[in-house]
Image (spheres, rainbow, N blue to C red):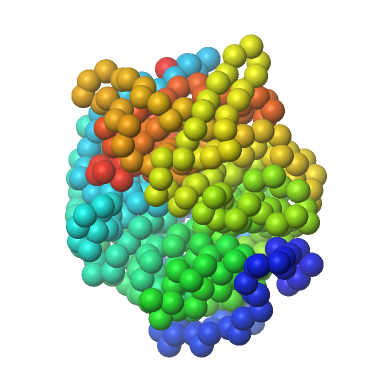
């Protein structure tokens, strides 16, 4: 462990030297044996994923340590539900979002997941009054993106907020759910019409989101406590510790705790960039952010820790909830890192001002995307920031924006384009944004679609964008 690269201790910060809590009995501790693979001699394995990606998106490329299937790399003989949806070619010069349709009723709280012909929405507590109720998880067939079809709806007893997937070489497909209840529920969805619970992982430090290293059975738990150890998880019997638990789900019915990694941050969300030459993970960690070398996905190494907002080391990060590093994106050549700021934890309408004219972009200090030059990974340098206007922006009925709800950066996806760096994300009541940051010093909003709701996540899938709405369901777009 590289203790020199943890967030520095500063006046007023809670000490982070905590004893590790006792691990729950339902998860065993990994030994020194190599990580096992999936399948057996009696089970025919599907061919390795195609070498050529369906589209150029290293955030989802399979890690070379395993090389299992991902949304961008699917075996030619893969099961029906793994196969890609029909491609919708991009225009040469992308100028905006074209709305197609909406579907579903459940909510994408901190994230949904797309894979092949499937879209899985975590469900969970609805916003506002009635938050003690649970919305069901939903699985949709995207074979015709213009007309998504509900395949199943199931109501786990544990409140969920986000989901990720593992595609095994033997054809199994497993959903890994995040929750605020101190556990990770694991479900088999090989047949998406009949989901089945396989295991429940008890977390020593609570949970908020999960991240599957693409093309592997390795899962990182993100507990969102940052370096300040916000006491989010004590009510669930866990300890709010600035650490990352790493699990091996080679056998999804018997998850193995590989290690409790004392990286000094409880990440809010973790994203990836995987190529044959470089394997990286990016931790948006509330008041600090980190860059990890994940050449060995079970044993990450910290390359950089830098403060949220200004990015100047060794000064402390802007404290939450004024700023809250929520999500991370990196461009194709890993020269620019984007950190989304969920100001005030998304409770208040934080977006303030946006102006772009004559090669200049101006935004206020709240609800931003922060753009960092990371060509020197150990010394990220802030380039600019951007948020949408907190103003009424009209769209054709019945999808008129309303000035209610929050406004802060949330989850999203890179949009593959050979000549530009494009990002699409949910910005709560500001809707779905399409952002160009080809010049990280002058990012700008290409287009914005504001529903009568709040967008929290966007997934790209073969030319389509799927935007999850906290007020229920999801919306489908193409690029125009």
Residue that protrudes farthest toward the top in the picture: 358
- 118 left or right of 388 in image: left
x, y percent for residue 30: 56, 81
Say which residue appears at 20% left-offset and 49% top-offset: 151
Q: In this view, does 212 lie above or below 75?
A: below
* Image location (x, y in percent) of residue 217: 50, 64
Looking at the picture, tell me which residue is in the foreground, 198 or 81.
198
Residue 193 position by quadrant: bottom left
On-image quarter of the C terminus: top left
Q: Which image quadrant: the N terminus?
A: bottom right
Residue 269 x, y percent position in the rendering: 52, 55
Residue at x-position 36% and y-position 22%: 393
Q: In front: 121, or 323?
A: 323
The answer to whether one can see residue 219 in this image is no
Q: Please give the count of numbered marks on the rendered protein.
A: 0
Residue 317 placement, left or right of 119? right
Q: Where is residue 423 in the image (x, y as percent from the top left)?
A: 53, 33
Which residue is located at x 38 percent, y 66 percent?
A: 180
Query: Does residue 278 sit above or below 236 in this rendering?
Result: above
Can I make out residue 128 in this image?
Answer: yes
Residue placed most toward the observer, 237 or 260: 237
At horizontal 26% and vertical 43% (from top left) the residue drawn is 471
């Amino acid at each position: 462990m590289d203790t020199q690269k943890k967030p520095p201790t500063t006046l007023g910060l809670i000490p982070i030297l905590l004893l590790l809590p006792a691990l729950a009995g339902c998860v065993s501790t990994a030994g020194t044996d190599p990580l096992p693979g999936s399948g057996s001699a009696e089970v025919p394995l599907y061919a390795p994923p195609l070498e050529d990606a369906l589209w150029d998106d290293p955030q989802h490329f399979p890690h070379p340590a395993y090389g299992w299937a991902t949304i961008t790399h699917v075996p030619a003989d893969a099961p029906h539900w793994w196969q890609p949806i029909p491609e919708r070619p991009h225009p040469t010069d992308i100028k905006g979002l074209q709305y197609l349709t909406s579907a579903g009723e459940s909510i994408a709280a901190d994230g949904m997941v797309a894979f092949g012909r499937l879209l899985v929405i975590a469900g969970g507590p609805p916003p506002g009054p009635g938050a003690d109720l649970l919305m069901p998880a939903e699985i949709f067939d995207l074979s015709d993106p213009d007309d998504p079809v509900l395949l199943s709806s199931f109501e786990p007893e544990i409140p969920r907020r986000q989901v990720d997937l593992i595609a095994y070489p033997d054809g199994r497909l497993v959903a890994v759910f995040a929750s605020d209840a101190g556990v990770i529920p694991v479900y088999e969805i090989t047949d998406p019409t009949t989901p089945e619970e396989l295991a429940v992982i008890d977390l020593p430090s609570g949970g908020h989101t999960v991240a599957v290293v693409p093309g592997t059975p390795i899962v990182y738990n993100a507990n969102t406590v940052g370096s300040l150890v916000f006491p989010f998880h004590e009510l669930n019997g866990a300890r709010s510790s600035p650490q990352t638990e790493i699990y091996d789900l080679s056998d999804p019915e018997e998850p193995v705790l590989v290690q409790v990694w004392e990286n000094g941050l409880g990440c809010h969300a973790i994203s990836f960039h995987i190529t044959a030459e470089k394997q990286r993970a990016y931790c948006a960690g509330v008041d600090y952010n980190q860059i990890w070398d994940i050449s060995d996905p079970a044993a990450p190494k910290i390359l950089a820790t830098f403060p949220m907002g200004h990015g100047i080391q060794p000064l402390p990060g802007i404290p939450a909830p004024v700023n809250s590093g929520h999500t991370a994106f990196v461009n194709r050549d890993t020269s620019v890192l984007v950190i989304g700021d969920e100001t005030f934890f998304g409770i208040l309408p934080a977006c303030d001002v946006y102006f772009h004219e004559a090669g200049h972009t101006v935004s206020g200090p709240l609800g931003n995307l922060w753009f960092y030059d990371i060509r020197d990974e150990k010394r990220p340098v802030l380039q600019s920031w951007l948020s949408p206007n907190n103003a009424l922006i009209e769209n054709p009925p019945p999808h008129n924006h309303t000035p209610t709800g929050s406004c802060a950066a949330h989850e999203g996806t890179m949009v593959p384009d050979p000549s530009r760096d494009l990002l699409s994300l949910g910005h709560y009541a500001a809707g779905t944004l399409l952002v160009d940051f080809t010049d990280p010093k002058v990012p700008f909003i290409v287009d914005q679609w504001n529903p009568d709701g709040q967008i929290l996540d966007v997934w790209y899938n073969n030319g389509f964008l799927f935007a999850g709405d906290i007020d229920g369901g999801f919306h489908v777009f193409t690029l125009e």
